[in-house]
Image: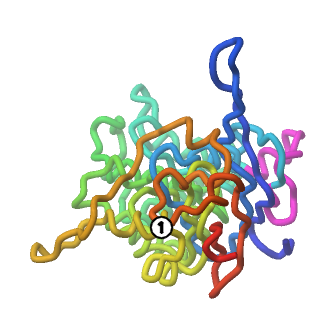
Amino acid sequence: MSNDKLLSVKNLTKIFRVGSLLFKKDLIAVNRVSFDIDKQEIFTLAGESGSGKSTFARMLLGLIKPTYGIILYKGVDITKIKSAKEKLWFTKEVQPIFQDPFETFSPLNRVETYLYDTAINYGIAKKRDEVYRIVVDKLNAVGLSLREIQGRYPHELSGGQLQRVSIARALITEASLLVADEPVSMIDASLRMSIVNLFKDLKEKFGLSVFYITHDLATAYYISDRIGVMLRGSIVELGPVEKVLNEPMHPYTQILKQSVPDPNPEKQWEEDIQLSAFDIREFTMTGCKFSARCPFVMDICKEKDPDNIDTNGRIVKCHLYR
């Protein structure tokens, strides 16, 4: 992987020990994941709940350590960062946008204090008038004014407003990468596209990259440059979003696409769609993790985990394309 990439992930793996004291098993929550993110790119990681997306995000943010593998950010392996100076640099460069904005802010503090404190604590500004100018500027960049939030507590703002404040706070640090974990799932449906559009605008205006995590293929298609589809810890298909979602190759991606309702009431699904809930067996089973649900399953699928195959401008993890 080239160091000129903004982010390069190689064989990233996280294994948890699960089960009772006498009957423990290894649960591979993230399994040898590799990909790059370019500068000024929106890369989406999509999949069902329980597929390993949030575990991956927590490793990327340094909240948990991988079992093995490397994460290179601007050429620096962040899994080996130890000094306070390096950690400050990394948290300034890579900022999270969490799923529930109401859990991001303490209900006891006024919202604007987080913005002022961020500018001061990261050394972005020292003088009061400079801090004020930066806060106003970043709020304006996300479609808010200081007047709208000043003196208010989190519960006095809508979910959409509060998520915009979260994004403004990330912009204050002059971050290069936003890690957005289901950032619109807790927001009213009428406001979701405004937040999605905001990410696209910020990419163009500030040259940001966004690592967008979602189970919603509609917003993924709209916002993404490239997409990786995750199944039980592995990326099973990766490539340009138009190719992956318009002409999916992996059977799991095909079923995910079919599970999105068509707005035309005259069209109906031609088959039953079976999407499992979190099932530990699919993490621990031998072979392909989709073999129990795949309509094209072969004997080898139950015996051997498929390799990543480069075909038609994308990566597909499936025995069908050997």
- Who is closer to the viewer here, 213 or 115? 213
Residue lying at the far left of the rendered structure: 266
Q: What stretch is highlighted in magenta?
A: 71-90
Residue 233 visible in the current orientation: yes
| Image vertical order of residue 288 relative to residue 285, above or below | below
**Percent x, y for residue 127?**
65, 51
At x 68%, y 18%, the residue is 23
10 Å crowding of disc 1: few (<14), some (14-19), many (20+): many
- In the picture, which quadrant includes the N terminus? bottom right
Residue 129 visible in the current orientation: no
**Percent x, y for residue 67?**
80, 40
306 in the magenta segment:
no
The number of callouts visible is: 1
At x 49%, y 46%, the residue is 98
> Which residue is denoted by mark 1 in the rendering?
253
Relative to 159, 268 lies left or right: left
Label 1 secondary element: helix
